[in-house]
Amino acid sequence: MGMSESELLSLVLVLRPEAAPGRALPAWWGAAAHALLLSAVRQVNPELAARLHDEQGPRPFTVSTLMGAGAHRALDPSRLYTLRFTALQAEVTLALREASAAGGPLAPGARLELDYLPFVVEQVFFTSDGHPWAGEGSYRQLMSAHLVQPAPPRRLRLRLASPTGFRSAEKQQPFPLPELVFGSLLERWNSFSPMAFPAEVRRFAAECLGVSAFNLSTRSARLKDSGLRIGCVGEVTFTALHYDRYWMNVLHTLAAYAFFSGVGASTPLGFGQASPGPVLPVEEAPE
């Protein structure tokens, strides 16, 4: 897919720590990854970085926690670790591609910092051929693949790889209720896609979808400034209780979008990493 066609990007960085740190490590690297993304974008497009930092509402990017550090909370210079950034707008995708090009702050060989710890970029992946969490696409491509199915399946599956939770009625809700999952995806889609879906998507999910199977575990992660975030990881299957081809096609489109957009609250801090198919484990949440 050409650069001009790719509004959606999932970029995977393979990192090597320069040295074993002589201090305690973050339990959750999402805030550090968020800061790194903004720093990298700032070096190629300062005006965009300022907007990404200041804007309210849904953000056109997500980050992961540092994958590979695990519950040991240790870094080994002989091992490789991975970090994932996604972009939901062409402008952000272009900035991440520029930052990853030769001489850029995320390019192979570049030195960067996460939580003030030095790493070297060993590899960068843009497609699933290189890493299962990498990929690229466009809103038009997702709609072409999913919105015109003559008989979309009654079931939708999502795999939640990092703690996924929702804000509902001023509370944290860690269970992926259909209206919360697809309401979250709809909000992001309508914020960034050139074609909006009807607000009734959320009502259809609430009234006509049920959770038919799940294999979920509770996970939490503690952020420095905003306390404990509670969510779930694992797999959940939704089934249409009342079938409608159009609405099911919209839901399948949104489920595919989840690979780029994430699901639920705090996706710019590493939460809600999701996919409709195999990918899993990110997790890396110690509590």
Image (spheres, grey):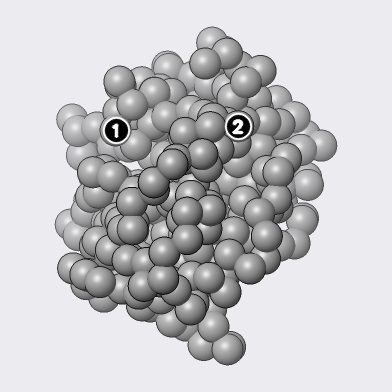
Q: Amino acid at mark 2?
A: Arg
In the image, taking residue 23 as reference, residue 269 lies left or right, namely right
Image quadrant in which the C terminus is located: bottom left
The residue positioned 21% from the left and 70% from the top of the image is 213
Which residue was labeled with disc 2? 140
Which of the pair 99/146 is nearer the observer?
146
The residue positioned 30% from the left and 20% from the top of the image is 129
Residue 268, quarter of picture: bottom right
In the image, taking residue 246 as reference, residue 241 lies left or right, namely left
Q: Amino acid at mark 1?
A: Pro
Q: Secondary structure at mark 2?
A: helix
Report x, y in % for residue 146.
47, 40
Report x, y in % for residue 114.
45, 44
Which residue was labeled with disc 1? 132
- N-term-proximal mark, 2 vs 1: 1
Gap in angstroms between the C-alphas marked 2 and 1: 22 Å
Residue 186 versus residue 41 in the image, above or below: below
Within 10 Å of the Cα at label 1, are there few (<14), some (14-19), or many (20+) other Cα atoms?
some
Q: Secondary structure at mark 1?
A: loop
In the image, taking residue 244 as reference, residue 120 lies left or right, namely left
How many badges with numbers are in the image?
2
The residue positioned 48% from the left and 78% from the top of the image is 207
Report x, y in % for residue 44.
70, 25
Report x, y in % for residue 277.
28, 45
Which of the pair 83/166 is nearer the observer?
166
Residue 218, quarter of picture: bottom left
Within 10 Å of the Cα at label 2, are there few (<14), some (14-19), or many (20+) other Cα atoms?
some
